[in-house]
Image (cartoon, rainbow, N blue to C red):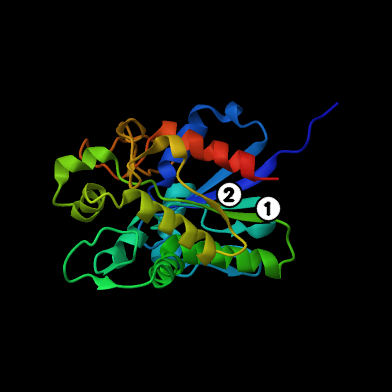
């Protein structure tokens, strides 16, 4: 007697896909119901992916070269998969930090004296716009449109880009905005606004928020889920990030994202 067929999943992402790829490569048997392939891209490679004739195809030579280097292929047929997951690709807490720099609504700290008072609805709309214009939001929406045109039942998901490790406080100049929000007690509210806005900005797409157990103070990741993160490299090569990276997650974090994907795929 055989079990149900494996669900074919294509996971696409920028450098943040490396955490998920490392987790799956280390223990694929942990997710027996998933048959996973990865499509990683550096820089603007994934921004150049468009749906043509039911296939994800790069539109520039530079994108083709990068995708071929990292994945040993440069195009993917939508019909080959039951689910698509976009990981990271700029869809993270920074989308809420953009309006936060100059605007406040009731429920946030007063912040700078020059901050413009706005309604929460207006702030939310600003964050939604940030999500839809981001690399990951735009890519997920393109894939969804391609799936719908092809009449597929495939699911499209977007997994939030991990929030910076709280160890980033060792580099306060680079992470000034988030550290200030944390200090003012706005972290939890910003996270709530961001997640609600991301869901609203991506109709028809399953939103996978950062796993609860990995968070710190609303806008950060617990350091244990960042230490030992690796770069996005060709094949199965694993090259560690420098100790002051702070923005990438590790394989332990990636495994939790795969758990979310396994639970979300019907």
Mark 1, secondary structure of its residue: helix
Image quadrant in which you'd find residue 222: top left
Query: What residue is shown with label 1?
Result: 80
Q: Looking at the picture, how far across and down is residue 149, in whole percent?
A: 69, 70
Q: Looking at the picture, how far across and down is residue 48, in whole percent?
A: 45, 67
CB under 8 Å between callouts 2 and 1?
Answer: yes
Q: Residue at x 42, y 39 (%)?
A: 19
Could you tell me how many numbered marks the image carries? 2
The label on residue 46 is none
Of the two numbered discs 2 and 1 on the same chain, state the one appearing first in sequence: 2
Query: What residue is shown with label 2?
Result: 10
Instruction: Examine the rendering and report whether any part of residue 211 can be seen.
Output: yes
Question: Could you tell me which quadrant the N terminus lies in?
Answer: top right
Q: Residue furthest front?
A: 106
Q: Which residue is drawn at 42% across and 58% down?
A: 193
Question: Could you tell me which quadrant the C terminus lies in?
Answer: top right
Q: Which residue is drawn at 59% across and 59% down?
A: 205
Kindly report which numbered mark, 2 or 1, lies closer to the viewer in this rendering.
Answer: 2
Image quadrant in which you'd find residue 8: top right
Q: Nearer the viewer, residue 65 or 44?
A: 44
Mark 2, secondary structure of its residue: strand
Dot 2: within a 10 Å radius of its alpha carbon, few (fewer than 14), some, or many (20 or more) residues? many
Q: Tell me how far mark 2 sits from mark 1, CA to CA.
A: 9 Å
Dot 1: within a 10 Å radius of its alpha carbon, few (fewer than 14), some, or many (20 or more) residues? few
Q: Looking at the picture, how far across and down is residue 137, in whole percent?
A: 48, 63
Q: Which residue lies furthest to the left in this view?
A: 173
Instruction: Examine the rendering and report whether any part of residue 57 can be seen.
Output: no
Q: Looking at the picture, how far across and down is residue 146, in whole percent?
A: 63, 67
């Amino acid at each position: 007697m055989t079990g149900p067929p494996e669900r074919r999943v294509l996971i696409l992402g920028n450098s943040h896909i490396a955490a998920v790829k490392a987790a799956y490569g280390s223990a694929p048997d942990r997710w027996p119901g998933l048959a996973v392939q990865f499509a990683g891209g550096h820089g603007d490679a994934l921004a150049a992916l468009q749906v043509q004739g039911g296939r994800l195809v790069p539109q520039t030579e530079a994108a083709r070269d990068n995708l071929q280097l990292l994945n040993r292929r440069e195009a993917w047929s939508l019909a080959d998969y039951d689910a698509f997951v976009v990981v990271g690709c700029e869809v993270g807490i920074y989308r809420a930090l953009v309006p936060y720099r100059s605007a406040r609504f009731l429920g946030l700290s007063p912040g700078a004296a020059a901050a413009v008072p706005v309604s929460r609805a207006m702030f939310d709309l600003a964050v939604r716009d940030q999500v839809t214009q981001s690399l990951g939001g735009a890519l997920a929406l393109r894939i969804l449109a391609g799936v719908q045109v092809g009449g597929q039942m495939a699911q499209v998901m977007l997994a939030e880009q991990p929030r910076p490790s709280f160890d980033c406080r060792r580099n306060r100049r680079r992470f000034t905005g988030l550290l200030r929000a944390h200090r003012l007690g706005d972290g939890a509210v910003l996270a709530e606004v961001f997640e609600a806005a991301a869901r609203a900005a991506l109709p028809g797409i399953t939103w996978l928020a950062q796993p609860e157990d990995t968070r710190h103070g609303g806008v950060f990741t617990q350091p244990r889920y960042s230490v030992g993160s690796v770069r996005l490299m060709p094949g199965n090569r694993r090259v560690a990030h420098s100790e002051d990276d702070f923005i990438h997650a590790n394989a332990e974090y990636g495994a939790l994202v795969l758990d979310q994907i396994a639970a979300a795929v019907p």
